[in-house]
Image: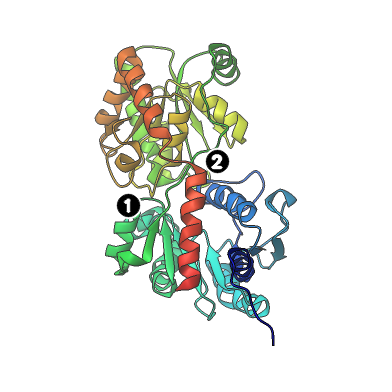
Amino acid sequence: MVTFNYNSKNIQIFATKLRKLMNIAVNTRLLIRDKLEGIGWFTYESLKRITTQHPEHHFYFIFDREYDPEFLFSDNITPIIQYPHARHPVLYYTWFEMAIPKLLERIKPDLFLSPDGFLSLKTPVKSMAVFHDLNFEHYPQDIPFWTRRYYRTYFPKYAAKAVRIATVSEFSKDDIVKQYNVSPDKIDVVYDGANDAYHPLTLAETESVREEFTGGLPYFIFIGSLHPRKNLANLFRAFDLFKKSNPSEVKLLIVGAKKWWTREIDIAFNRMVFSDDVIFTGRLNIDELAGVLGSALALTYVSYFEGFGIPIVEAFRCDVPVITSNVTSMPEVAGDAALLVDPFNPESIEEALYKSYQYESIRQELIIRGRRRKDMFSWQQTADRLWESIEKAVKS
């Protein structure tokens, strides 16, 4: 007969052994080298911390293509390549409803975690989704027909399937509850963060960056995918109004890939009087992004729908004033540290451009308020909150 001595040391050892039993499969299809955007950065920053800080657990990272070893953050990760590439509604279905169930049956994880919200309806494995926003429910016209049809068919089912949902703002949580009739007790708000690369620049650094991108001239900046909801059409109209009423050498720097460039955006741009003062950089790496943001007059982030709005926090970290929208999650993230505008009114946006350009006192007050607010959001806090949500999901 074996007697177990229940002293504190043995209890600790026993608890550690129990914790080692957790195996978590993660949909990491958006971890693609040099192509990380909002959800990709969320996946990268949160999973990098979770996997390294919880070595007692094992993680299966499921890619839909060859992966970069950079994404294997620690020794407790097993990478799996599961084809086909899931980048089209037909392939979404093939990957999530045919390939993933078979894979999960083979590896038998305790939880399937999906940072991009997609789940598999045909697996009995406990599943947890991260829903970043439901823009496609409010502005379906902004998304290609078959993509929006897939989203609007399957995301309500994913919400019902998930044992737990994480999301990135109280706004998004309320939206999920209303749109999909989900209990608020099932949803955890984890927020987004900002990369440590973003920090204030010296005057010499600012001058160097401006020289490279605008020939030394000051500029407003937009950062993000060039998607209709980012409201570039009204930003172009507002910038034109600003230039007409404020003759200056100020430029507008647009940072991001033209993946979603639409006819409306194209028309608004081609009707600009000052289109020559708009500079498109394309996609930039993280160090370049930190440089161009830190050297800007102000961030112009006037989307009409966001689940969070990571560039807002990035600008706070760079001591750069923020102009953002007064709708959806943006007031929640910006608080009192931004000029809030009506994104549907170019004159409202133009007024904020004017204030941030003309009044140094306003600029400095926004910078001070941004410094106070920036520490409310960090990727470490995101990872900690997401891990707490994962634990709840496994125990459910």
Residue at 63% in and 71% down = 21
| Mark 2 residue type | Ala
Question: Which of the two marks, 1 or 2, is nearer to us in this view?
Answer: 1
Question: Toward the viewer: 277 or 132?
Answer: 132
User: Quadrant of residue 176 in the image?
Assistant: bottom left
| Relative vertical location of residue 182 with respect to residue 143 in this rendering, above or below | below
Query: Horizontally, is 158 left or right of 60 in the view?
Result: left
Residue at 35% in and 12% down = 247
Which image quarter is the C terminus in?
A: bottom left
Mark drawn on residue 170: 1
Which image quarter is the N terminus in?
A: bottom right
Residue at 52% in and 59% down = 115
Describe the element under mark 2 as helix, strand or loop: loop
| Relative vertical location of residue 368 with respect to residue 215 in this rendering, above or below | below
- For marks 1 and 2 on the same chain, the one whose residue lies earlier in the sequence: 1
Q: CA distance from mark 1 to mark 2?
A: 29 Å
| Mark 1 residue type | Glu
Residue at the spot of label 2? 257
Query: Horizontally, is 182 left or right of 317 in the view?
Result: left
Question: Toward the viewer: 201 or 148?
Answer: 201
Query: How far across and how far down the image is residue 205, in percent?
Result: 58, 16
Describe the element under mark 1 as helix, strand or loop: helix
User: Quadrant of residue 206 in the image?
Assistant: top right
Query: Horizontally, is 47 left or right of 394 in the view?
Result: right
Query: How far across and how far down the image is residue 376, in percent?
Result: 40, 39
| Relative vertical location of residue 199 with respect to residue 132 in this rendering, above or below | above
